Amino acid sequence: MPLGVLLLGERPRGGGYWWDFALVLGYAGLAMMGVQFALTARFKRATAPFGIDLIYYFHRFLATVAFALLLLHAGLLWWKYPEAVGSIDPRRAPGHMTLGWLAMLAFTTGIVSSLWRKRLRIEYDRWRRLHVLLALLGVVLAVLHVEGSGTYLRSPWKRAAWTALALSWLSLAMWVRLVRPALLLRRPWRVTEVRRERGRSWTLTLAPERGAVFAYQPGQFAWLTLRASPFALREHPFSFASSPTRPGSVQFTIKELGDFTRGIGRIQPGERAYLDGPYGSFGIDRHPGASGFVFIAGGVGIAPLIGMLRAMADRGDRRPLWLFYGNRNWERVVFREELDALAGTLDLTVVHVLGEPPADWRGETGFIDRDVLQRHLPSGRADLHYLVCGPAPMIRLAERSLDELGIPLKQLHSEIFDIA
Ligand SMILES: Cc1cc2nc3c(=O)[nH]c(=O)nc-3n(C[C@H](O)[C@H](O)[C@H](O)COP(=O)(O)OP(=O)(O)OC[C@H]3O[C@@H](n4cnc5c(N)ncnc54)[C@H](O)[C@@H]3O)c2cc1C
């Protein structure tokens, strides 16, 4: 659409094919960069069909493609039209060209720090603040570069259309970073309980300071901010481990992993919290017609699944259920007593799979793979819906195994905890 606008009305002539092609790459790359603000704006309706994990993967993919287009734009012009590009030295170059180079620098830093964040050992929260800053800076500088160079934007209405487009991207960023945090500030929550669980995990119970808990579905998640303002960009995503059938509070079960999660045990009841949610499309309620469910969890991937099991128990759901639950050892199995109790209330078969089993262990060992699944699933397994949650390698293995067992892709739903 942004390119379509450029083609309407009066067009510049005489540039030649490669000139026009290089400019189009620039406009297309910038428009795709701008669209990233919409992708990451967390519009519930837009993200619901896909799930936030896929949206973030798509964002990463699309931003990389957009960056490649911008690189080609700059590279092609530099190679074919060095006189038009001029000097890279800001003292000798026109202002708008310097702005273009600075935009490229911001985008390059943004892409490199995102693709190789872990390798560069950039702490997540710090990276996130840098990412937002670089994205905003890159787009603003690039729009000023486009407006300054003016090719294709000579007519006032084209310039107005592109300016409006750029402002719409920036207003999305303002919505996410300023308006939504301000709304969260008006709806604070309190921590009411912090409970230690097995496997270096904690269950945190929160209740709204005023009013009722928002409506959510089992399996969804919210962004949690503790000991910080919602403006501080220190929020972390956690799945509801509680069931919406028990109103008044929500629970999250959180495994100690890094700086933020290692501090959960030090949180005191009475402390203030902020919750942005609910989000996500992972859960039983999206598949009301399913004849039964198979849950596959690795470690703390049990969190959204226990929420679903609790909801089903409260609702008196009698559909057949299987839970394949992988853990390193028996001591780490979060909720293992509650799962025994749930197996008595629900039509639930729990299959524990241990990586390092005790000497007297008679259950499954190793990983949740094709053989383990095949041994316990019924012959009508292709009619069931499968919900998989845990670390990415576990999800990949489970998905491959289910595919080999002939489970249709449309009945397979997964939630990846590692979106960054
Ligand atoms: C949809 C979803 C639901 C989740 N539900 C749960 C849950 O119920 N229980 C649970 O224990 N964990 C859950 N997680 C994972 C949890 O968000 C991370 O473990 C936590 O944010 C790690 O933060 P940290 O600072 O302690 O660790 P770090 O060492 O800083 O991070 C470890 C990894 O977690 C990810 N991460 C860190 N901070 C964030 C952030 N702000 N936003 C997104 N990802 C981040 C990054 O991939 C990072 O490499 C969920 C993740 C997602 C995406």
Image: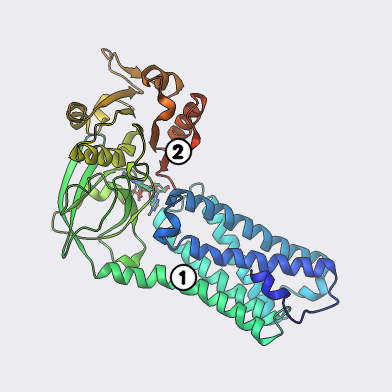
Q: Evaluate whether residue 90 shows in this view.
A: no
Task: Report crowding for label 2: few under 14, some 14 to 19, many 20 or more residues within 10 A (C-alpha).
Answer: some
Which three-letter amino acid code belongs to the residue tagged 1? Leu
Q: Residue furthest front?
A: 289
Instruction: Give the image location of residue 7, x and y in percent.
Output: 73, 74
Left or right: 418 with respect to 143? left
Dot 2 beta carbon under 8 Å from ligand 1: no
Task: Give residue 255's position: percent from left, percent from top.
Answer: 29, 42
Q: Nearer the viewer, mark 2 or mark 1?
A: 1
User: Of callouts 2 and 1, which one flags the residue occurring earlier in the amino acid sequence?
Assistant: 1
As drawn, is 1 to the left or to the right of 357?
Answer: right
The part of the image, by quadrant, that contains residue 125 is bottom left
- What is the CA distance from the residue labelled 2 to the residue labelled 1? 30 Å
Residue drawn 39% across the image and 17% down it: 375
Name the residue located 38 percent from the left edge and 21 percent from the top edge.
377
- Would you say residue 69 is visible in this rendering? yes
Residue shown at 42% from the left, 45% from the top: 418
Query: Could you tell me if the residues under marks 2 and 1 are in contact, i.e. CB atoms within 8 Å?
Result: no
350 or 236: which is nearer to us? 350
Q: Which residue is mark 1?
A: 172
Q: Looking at the image, is 254 positioned above or below residue 211? A: above
Q: How is the image coloured?
A: rainbow
Q: Residue flagged by tag 2: what amino acid is it?
A: Ala
Q: Give the number of the disc on residue 320.
A: none
For label 2, the residue is 392
How crowded pointer 1 is (Cα within 10 Å; few <14, some 14-19, many 20+) is rated as many
The N terminus sits in image quarter? bottom right
Looking at this view, is 403 or 150 the one in front?
A: 403
Under circle 1, the secondary element is helix
In the image shown, does 231 or 59 lie closer to the viewer?
59
Q: Position of residue 92 (x, y in %)?
A: 73, 81
